[in-house]
Amino acid sequence: MKKGTQVLTDRKKQTTEVITPPKTATQMLYEHHGVLRGIMERLSRTSRDDIEQRRALTDELYSEVQMHERIEEHIFYPAISDFHPKLDAAWSEHRQMTDQLAALLRADPGGARFEEELRLMRDVLEAHAHLDEELEMFPEVERLMDEAWLVEMGERLQDRLDRLRSSRTLRARHRLERMMLRGPGRLIARTMRRGS
Ligand SMILES: [Fe+2]
Ligand SMILES: [Fe+2]
């Protein structure tokens, strides 16, 4: 059971209520790193024949990485910029992740290069998410900020992530970006099919 979770049992009403404590900002971001890792793990278990699945999982990874970078860059990083000195490095590592994600999207899911790009994607993600954020930035934020700040920031981050995930406009934008990255030929073919 999660730390801080309480189980309240009302014997008269014969009901049990499980109260889970709100997530802090660092717990929320750590868990979302887990989502990114989970997608890459599922991708690494696919074979070169699973082209459609590789494409679907890469699409999912694309959206989740973009949303992760967005909530950190728009909410979390500005909130810690006064006391965290290494934010420039974090921003440039986000650009590296975006570039590597583009390389993964461009790679043929049925070819050897896809596996190499996936391996590089894992390296780039872990260098940033694990080494810089989970081992350095997050513990520092937890040390310097109080529980109320951490919980409020966690709610803001989760709320923004939920809203981004349910945004049809963002979904359409990501779809278009992916098609452009995979090649204008694919985009033109799809547009022509829709028009016919
Ligand atoms: Fe980050
Ligand atoms: Fe992160």
Image (cartoon, rainbow, N blue to C red):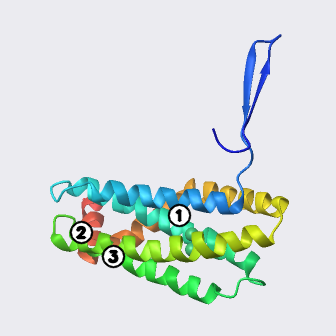
For the point 40% across and 57% down, the residue is 39
Marks 3,1: beta carbons within 8 A:
no
Say what secondary structure mark 2 lies in: helix
From the top left corner, tell me how far across and down residue 190 is, in percent. 27, 64
Q: CA distance from mark 2 to mark 3?
A: 9 Å
Q: Residues within 10 Å of mark 1 (few under 14, many from 20)?
A: some
For the point 62% across and 54% down, the residue is 162
Q: CA distance from mark 3 to mark 1?
A: 26 Å
Foreground of the two, 114 or 167: 114
- Which mark lies nearer to you, 2 or 1? 2
From the top left corner, tell me how far across and down residue 136 is, in percent. 62, 76
Of the numbered discs 2 and 1, the one sitting upstream in the chain is 2
Marks 2,1: beta carbons within 8 A:
no
Number of labels in the image equals 3
| Ligand 1, image quadrant it occupies | bottom right
Left or right of 97? Residue 165 is right
Say what secondary structure mark 3 lies in: helix
- Which mark lies nearer to you, 3 or 1? 3
Of the numbered discs 2 and 3, the one sitting upstream in the chain is 2
Of the numbered discs 3 and 1, the one sitting upstream in the chain is 3
Q: Which residue is mark 3?
A: 120
Left or right of 14? Residue 40 is left
Q: CA distance from mark 2 to mark 1?
A: 28 Å
Q: Which residue is mark 1?
A: 170
Callout 2 amino acid: Glu
From the top left corner, tell me how far across and down residue 145 is, in percent. 81, 69
Q: Residues within 10 Å of mark 2 (few under 14, many from 20)?
A: many
Q: Which residue is mark 2?
A: 115
Callout 3 amino acid: Leu
